[in-house]
Image: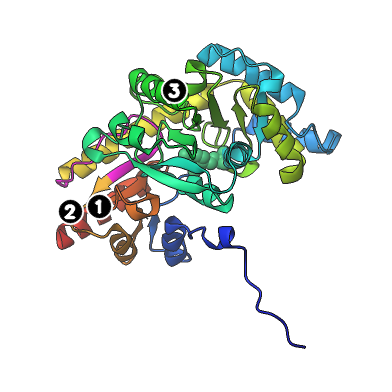
Amino acid sequence: MSVPTLNPGRSAAHVPGSGIREVVNAAMGREDVIHLEIGEPGARTPAHLVEAAHSAMGSSNRYTHSAGMPALRDAIARRLHRAYGLSAAEDDIVVGQGAVEALLATIVAVTDPGDEVLVPDPAWPNYEMQTLMRGAVPVRYPLRPENGFVPDMADISPLLGPRTKAIVVNSPSNPTGAVFSRAVMAELVEEAARAGVLVISDEVYDQIIFDGDHVCAAALNPEGVVSVFSFSKTYAMTGSRVGYLTGPRWLVPTIAKLQEPILSSVSTASQAAAIEALNGPQDFVATSLASYRDRRDLAHTLLADAGIAAPMPAGAFYMMVPLHQQADSRRAALDLIGHGVATAPGTAFGDVARHFLRISLAAARPDLEEGLARLAGWYHQTN
Ligand code: PLP
């Protein structure tokens, strides 16, 4: 039988592979390598959350409302009011399969193919991948190291054009750990509103902040912002895949509608764990924050002692390690695996941070110490 050549669709084919995955694959199965490349809490999920998931699965393992269980959305509404003074009702909230799916549903809901989405550089790679798979066009705006990786409106304003539908912001930031001040976030939200552009604010690290307070973008302009949150990092439940968003009435019902064809509903057991996470004791959150702070301070001191001046992250659990200006961080990260430590190259996050490596502070303390000693040894051999 003669068959025509089959190909994937163009939008999907244009989605780049992950630059972090390349390092993960190269380091896989090597017991001599310390892993500082992955952004995931090492702690176990608190026992009362595991118990809630377990008993939900035993009692009612059925589909839920596609926008999320009412009891969960109610607990989220109360949390958003307590934390940020937001008055979101149950219908203003959508539960997603992790923040990653909530972000995808938002991008699909607000754009058409060919529209532009402004995406930070450096940024977590998924924003660009999601925009491309929708057939929309990611346009990068720089977060310059010399500006503390915080946006400058002078870089963003000229990029807001007739095809711009949304701008993605992420504070606290993965990969940089930068936290935007209220003034910066307010200026950005105002400028986007003037241009008729939706702000998609990824706030999954909102409870991992060392210096300053988290500014919830949706609280600044509920009509023009979708704020996205997650249980993954705060409660060490990355595998449960629960996140959520709140946004304006002109958009949230459309996002909620998309949950049906995308996933029908998020895992019932995971939603039960999420309800318990919000309604139960919060000591795990405070303990984790203290331990991330401890590891951040340790990493900063160890690098400084080795003569490497890393910018101090104000939130999230990452640190950017500067290389010399000619360094190719992709090659450096692959080379470093041979020296027993895996890191994420700045090139995985865009172009602006190509002379940096990202390390995760979520690694265990002894791993962080040994990994940084190896990194420092390599650094002085090659720099
Ligand atoms: N947003 C950022 C900035 C992240 O770093 C991550 C995970 O690494 C996510 C979203 C994904 O969160 P979730 O596990 O809720 O999908």
Cβ of mark 3 under 8 Å from ligand 1: the answer is no
Q: Residue at x 47, y 17 (%)?
A: 220
Closer to the N terminus: mark 3 or mark 2?
Answer: 3
Secondary structure beneath dot 1 equals loop
Q: Is residue 20 visible?
A: yes
Q: Answer with the quarter of the image where residue 54 lies.
A: top right
* Marks 1 and 2 close (CB-CB < 8 Å): yes
Amino acid, disc 2:
His
Where does residue 170 sit, x and y in percent of width and height?
43, 34
Cα gap from disc 1 to disc 2, whole angstroms: 7 Å
Residue located farthest toward the front when viewing the structure as drawn: 162
Closer to the N terminus: mark 1 or mark 2?
Answer: 2
Closer to the N terminus: mark 1 or mark 3?
Answer: 3
- Determine the main secondary structure of the stretch shown in magenta: loop
Residue located farthest toward the bottom when viewing the structure as drawn: 1
Q: Which residue is mark 1?
A: 355
In front: mark 3 or mark 2?
3
Where does residue 157 sit, x and y in percent of width and height?
35, 32
